[in-house]
Amino acid sequence: MCAARALQSTHMVTGIEHVAIASPDPLRLALWYVEHLDFVINYQPAQSKTVFIKAADGSMIEIIEAAPGTVPAESMNAAGLRHLALTVADFAGVYARLQEKGVRFLTDAQTTNGNSLAFFTDPDGNILHLLHRETPLP
């Protein structure tokens, strides 16, 4: 049983390498994430408009070209992936900086049981979740 378990564990998912966002202008959106959220552009494949951006913890977003005439769902609870949660150490500082830069917030900042959060959108209308947890989830 132990050998079977060891073999099985090598096939398990170990994490999420990246998520993808489709944008009418991938480079423009990537540069917004660089400017507003301190991501860095880490990879741009040749012969493609795709741009990979990376956060300080190594997590990545792949920004691909969207199909013409399409837009993200506006509802915060429509079917499908609905938001991308971005963790920050200094919630108040990042929240204030984003407000100063004119970012469109969908909710006010709130803190409950040591968790600070607010929802906002990127320029394409994708929903982002600014988050600081005093105690990480188990």
Image (cartoon, grey):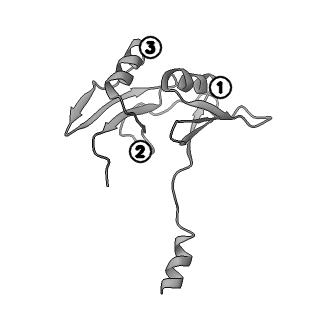
Does any portion of residue 51 appear in the rendered image?
no
Q: Nearer the viewer, mark 3 or mark 1?
A: 3
| Most foreground residue, 69 or 66 | 66
Disc 2 crowd rating (10 Å Cα; few below 14, some 14-19, many 20+) is few
| Most foreground residue, 95 or 78 | 95
Give residue 35's position: percent from left, percent from top.
54, 20
Give residue 53's position: percent from left, percent from top.
60, 34
Q: Determine the CA span between mark 3 and mark 1.
A: 19 Å
The three-letter code of the residue at mark 1 reads: Leu
Question: Which quadrant of the view contains residue 104?
Answer: top left
Q: Give the residue at x 62% y 26%.
A: 24
Q: Which residue is mark 2?
A: 79
Q: Which residue is mark 3?
A: 101
Q: Which residue is mark 1?
A: 27
Q: Residue 39, labelled with which disc?
A: none
Rendered-image quadrant of the C terminus = bottom left
